[in-house]
Image: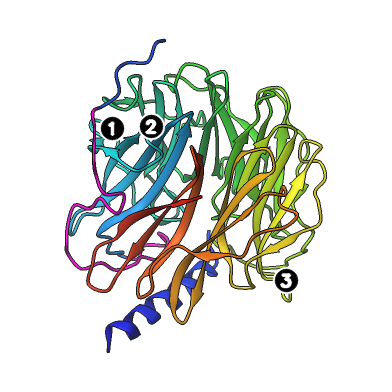
């Protein structure tokens, strides 16, 4: 089989799998040295895409297979999971940039002395949040849940990522079962807000906790929605007004929804659908969305597989997520796995991936009209590779986009590009 045929088969398989059912004062920063924004990888061994951690399947992962990025003022923080050959548990690496992602610090190991991560991968990435010199990383540890998933594990830094120490498990149920699909964000006061899925007492549901001491301790857990879709990633966004918002995929129908707090996470609204697609689907599509809070407005990028409406859509809300604008399609019917960012005002950037001619490519579009109109999409990834799961953050001069990719015979790598 030719390399191009192998690549097309891998991309096609990834799509099929995605539709399968589931289940004080800052210290001096680490020295920054020029490093190509192209990739960090521990090995040059052959690479194979996995199956999103389903069941007991033995998945071969080599190179960078998990990525998260956190923007804190003018500083970017990157968390990567780097798999060596024949390793089922990767090294979690932190990198830091103070020049909008043009150069990066040397990688620092995050998980030393902590519970090893259980197969973080795209769609269920190890997560990172930052507030000044305080950083929190969260990942899934081994346990008794589906696919061997278990409790959350954390690591914390008080010096901007120069050193890391193991932190506590944010969940208070004490169960060894699956606690995954986490997301975390820090607000303007330095509080960390965390959401995840677990099945305490019944079906998978959306849980919440916060930390006011940089991840050294976590609040009593709240159940935001007792039953949700089982395997889609969640997104938490914080507003400058003390609001906290969580985007998740609901169940029956499997449209996406937002649940909001206007008092720093003390109390929560009822969930509100983000687009009334009424998608009746007996399974988990493994696709979440993007959510940002800018001033009094929320912007969301959601995906649906509803017949005749499949694709990614931008919507906005001006009432703390209680109601949403009409969905506006971004890209074509094959657009999925999107993310959003804003530099302020009416500026927005949307990124997503799609399968084209058997290859998964990363695209981006910008709007200067608050999302009412968008410029023509541009392809960011190169041809002949499999690029997917983009993330975008606002930086000085525009936006920085990140994604992971593989080429035939090469390990997984991370890439980034500037979007003016």
Q: Residue at x 67, y 68 (%)?
A: 281
For disc 1, the neighbor class at 10 Å (few under 14, some 14 to 19, many from 20) is some
Q: What stretch is highlighted in magenta?
A: 31-57
Q: In this view, does 70 lie above or below 64?
A: above
Q: Which residue is drawn at 39% across and 81% down?
A: 8
For label 3, the crowd category at 10 Å Cα-Cα, with few meaning under 14, some 14 to 19 and many 20 or more, is some
Main secondary structure type of the part rendered in magenta: loop
Q: Name the residue under label 3.
A: 309
**Residue under numbered circle 1:** 114
Residue 115 % position (x, y): 30, 36
Earlier residue among tags 2 and 3: 2
Q: Quadrant of the N terminus?
A: bottom left
Pointer 2: what residue? Answer: 154
Judge from the rendering whether residue 355 lies leftward or rightward of residue 386; answer left or right.
right
Q: Distance of mark 2 from mark 3, alpha carbons?
A: 39 Å
User: Which sits earlier in the primary sequence, circle 1 or circle 3?
Assistant: 1
Q: In this view, does 298 lie to the left or right of 141?
A: right
- Classify mark 3: helix, strand or loop: loop
x, y percentage for residue 106?
Answer: 22, 37
């Amino acid at each position: 089989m030719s390399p191009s045929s192998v690549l097309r088969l891998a991309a096609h398989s990834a799509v099929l799998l995605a539709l399968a059912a589931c289940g004080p004062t800052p210290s001096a920063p680490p020295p920054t040295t020029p490093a190509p924004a192209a990739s960090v990888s521990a090995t040059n061994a052959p690479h194979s895409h996995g199956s999103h951690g389903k069941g007991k399947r033995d998945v071969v992962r080599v190179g960078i297979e998990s990525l998260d990025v956190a923007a804190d003022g003018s500083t970017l923080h990157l968390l990567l999971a780097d798999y060596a050959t024949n390793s089922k548990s990767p090294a979690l690496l932190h990198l830091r940039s103070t020049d909008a992602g043009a150069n990066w610090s040397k990688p620092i190991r995050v998980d030393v002395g902590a519970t090893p991560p259980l197969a973080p991968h795209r769609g269920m990435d190890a997560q990172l949040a930052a507030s000044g010199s305080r950083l929190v990383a969260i990942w899934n540890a081994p346990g008794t849940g589906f696919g061997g998933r278990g409790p959350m594990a954390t690591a914390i830094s008080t010096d901007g990522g120069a050193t890391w120490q193991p932190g506590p498990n944010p969940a208070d149920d004490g169960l060894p079962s699956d606690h995954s699909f986490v997301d975390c964000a820090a607000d303007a006061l330095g509080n960390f807000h965390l959401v995840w899925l677990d099945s305490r007492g019944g079906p998978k549901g959306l849980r919440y906790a916060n930390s006011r001491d940089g991840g050294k301790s976590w609040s009593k857990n709240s159940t935001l929605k007792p039953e949700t879709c089982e395997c889609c990633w969640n997104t938490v966004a914080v507003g400058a007004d003390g609001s906290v918002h969580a985007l998740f995929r609901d169940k029956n129908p499997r449209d996406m929804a937002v649940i909001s707090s206007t008092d720093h996470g003390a109390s929560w609204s009822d969930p509100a659908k983000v687009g009334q697609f009424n998608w009746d689907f007996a399974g988990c599509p493994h696709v979440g969305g993007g959510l940002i809070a800018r001033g009094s407005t929320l912007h969301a990028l959601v995906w649906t597989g509803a017949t005749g409406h499949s694709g990614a859509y931008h919507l906005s809300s001006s009432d703390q997520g209680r109601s949403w604008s009409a969905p506006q399609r971004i890209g074509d019917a094959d657009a999925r796995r999107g993310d959003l960012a804003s530099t302020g005002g009416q500026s927005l950037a949307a990124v997503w991936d799609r399968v084209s001619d058997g290859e998964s490519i990363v695209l981006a579009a910008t709007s200067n009209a608050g999302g009412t109109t968008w410029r023509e999409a541009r392809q960011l990834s190169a041809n002949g590779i499999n690029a997917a799961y983009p993330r975008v953050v606002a930086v000085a001069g525009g936006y920085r986009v990140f994604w992971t990719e593989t080429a035939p015979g090469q390990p997984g790598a991370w890439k980034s590009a500037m979007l003016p």
